[in-house]
Amino acid sequence: SASNQRRTKGLRRATALVREALEACWKRGLATPRSTFLLGFSDGAVVAVEVGLGVALGGVLAFSGSLLPECILASQAPALPAPSERTGAESVKTQDETRDVTRSTPFLLTHGSKDDR
């Protein structure tokens, strides 16, 4: 539906903004991916999970979010240079690397039985 398409577009934009902000912090040495924890509620939970699927973080806590097939953004992330060509600032993984990231990032996903979605 048009509503789902607008929501997905917004989630893509929000995910990109969060990734950009985190990468800027990591590049400046303000934190490391492993010292970074993301927490999200509702659509924020979707964004936190999507970012966490692309980089090995300290952890992701997602409350009352959803995992919609059209919102699985990590598998749609642009391909990055080969690991040997990376400068170290890139954190989003290619689709082939996502499996290893999700094994190393702890995720806590919760959802109440009284929520709308």
Image (cartoon, grey):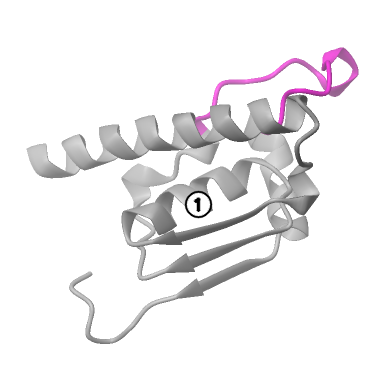
**Callout 1 amino acid:** Ala
The picture places residue 99, in percent across and down from the top left corner, at: 70, 49
Image coordinates of residue 94 in percent, x first then y, are: 66, 30
Looking at the image, is 40 positioned above or below residue 96?
A: below
**Where is 25 relative to 37, above or below?**
above
Q: As drawn, is 42 to the left or to the right of 4?
A: right
User: Label 1: which residue?
Assistant: 48
**88 magenta-colored:** yes
Residue for point 45% across, 37% down: 15
The image quarter in which residue 113 lies: bottom left
Q: Quadrant of residue 22?
A: top right
Q: In which quarter of the image is residue 55?
A: top right
Residue 64 vs 40, above or below: the answer is below
> Which type of secondary structure does the marked residue at label 1 adopt?
helix
Q: Residue at x 27, y 32 (%)?
A: 9
| Quadrant (top left/top right/bottom left/bottom right) for the N terminus | top left
Q: Residue furthest bottom?
A: 113
Residue 39 in view, yes or no: yes
Does 9 appear in magenta?
Answer: no
Viewer-side residue, 115 vs 1: 115
The magenta-colored residue range is: 76-94
Left or right relative to 12: residue 5: left
SS assignment for the magenta stretch, majority: loop
| Residue 20 picture location, percent across and down | 56, 27
Outermost residue toward the right in this view: 84
Residue 64 position (above or below residue 80) = below
The residue drawn where x is 68% and y is 54% is 102
